[in-house]
Amino acid sequence: DAMVIQNPRYQVTQFGKPVTLSCSQTLNHNVMYWYQQKSSQAPKLLFHYYDKDFNNEADTPDNFQSRRPNTSFCFLDIRSPGLGDAAMYLCATSRDQGGYTFGSGTRLTVV
Amino acid sequence: AQSVTQPDIHITVSEGASLELRCNYSYGATPYLFWYVQSPGQGLQLLLKYFSGDTLVQGIKGFEAEFKRSQSSFNLRKPSVHWSDAAEYFCAVGPSGGTYKYIFGTGTRLKVLA
């Protein structure tokens, strides 16, 4: 089945230690998104790629970066995780404006 | 400014009872509208979407939603709730600012009593 896969499902990292979360898709969607979701809150968009074009949200901290080496993969890099970065990170894809397909998310814990 | 409001943070219903979750939006034109469901520790799953046409939209798991332009609403309904429907429900509207982004409401947490 075509889908969006996030790895790992759970990630524990140390305060200040760089961490990378990955997302892959078999839908051949041209847009990929990264959302941060804290407990009992709506998902918050960090950035998205339209094809190779990177679009950062104005309030996304510089600590967060992203890479999209090809259509299928997208990575979220957190350069120096703080305790406030503990959250669920959701990857989503879309074909232009056709609505999102979400992955199952990566739960990040910072210790 | 574009926005979406889900007025109910928590809703509790008995199993077998009917359900309506409210979603109101502010948007300059006819928006694309979505309802997603999120089980604990999981990603969001699309329940249904409205782009145009028939204002009553059928989705998965027995859900439906009705787009009412005059009320700027897109309420989600189910005639008979099952215990497995307990989850968080998000309404989304867009696209936002001429991009491919959607705005999410703050969610409604549904509890189902046996």
Image: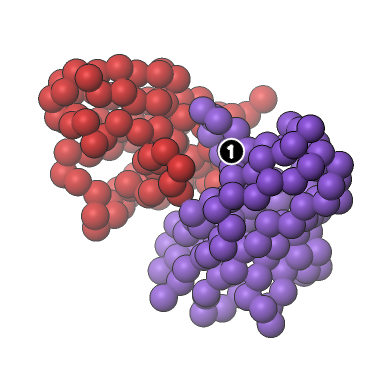
Which of B99 and B20 lies nearest the eye of the viewer?
A: B20
Query: Which image quarter holds the C terminus of chain A?
Result: top left
Residue at x 45% of width, y 71% of height: B2
Query: Which image quarter holds the N terminus of chain A?
Result: top right
Question: In the displayed structure, does residue B16 sit left or right of residue B34?
Answer: right
Which of A103 and A17 lies nearest the eye of the viewer?
A: A17
Vertically, is A103 above or below A97?
Answer: above
Question: In the displayed structure, does residue A86 sit left or right of residue A5?
Answer: left
Colour of chain A in the image: red
**Residue A39 at what x, y percent from top left?**
42, 38
**Residue B79 at what x, y percent from top left?**
86, 51
**Residue A85 at what x, y percent from top left?**
26, 35
Look at mark 1 in the image and give the residue it sits on: B38
- Dot 1 falls on a residue whose secondary structure is strand
Residue at x 33% of width, y 47% of height: A47
| Type of colouring | by chain
- Colour-to-chain, purple: B
Vertically, is B45 above or below B78?
Answer: above
Which of B77 and A30 lies nearest the eye of the viewer?
A: B77
**Residue B11 at what x, y percent from top left?**
65, 50
Regarding residue A76, the answer to whether it shows in the image is yes
Residue at x 29% of width, y 54% of height: A57
Q: How many labels were placed on the picture?
A: 1
Regarding residue A4, the answer to whether it shows in the image is no
**Neighbour tally class for label 1: few under 14, some 14-19, many 20 plus, Cα within 10 Å:** some
What chain letter is assigned to the residue under label 1? Answer: B
User: What type is the residue that disc 1 sits on?
Assistant: Gln
Which of B52 and A88 lies nearest the eye of the viewer?
A: A88
Residue at x 45% of width, y 65% of height: B96
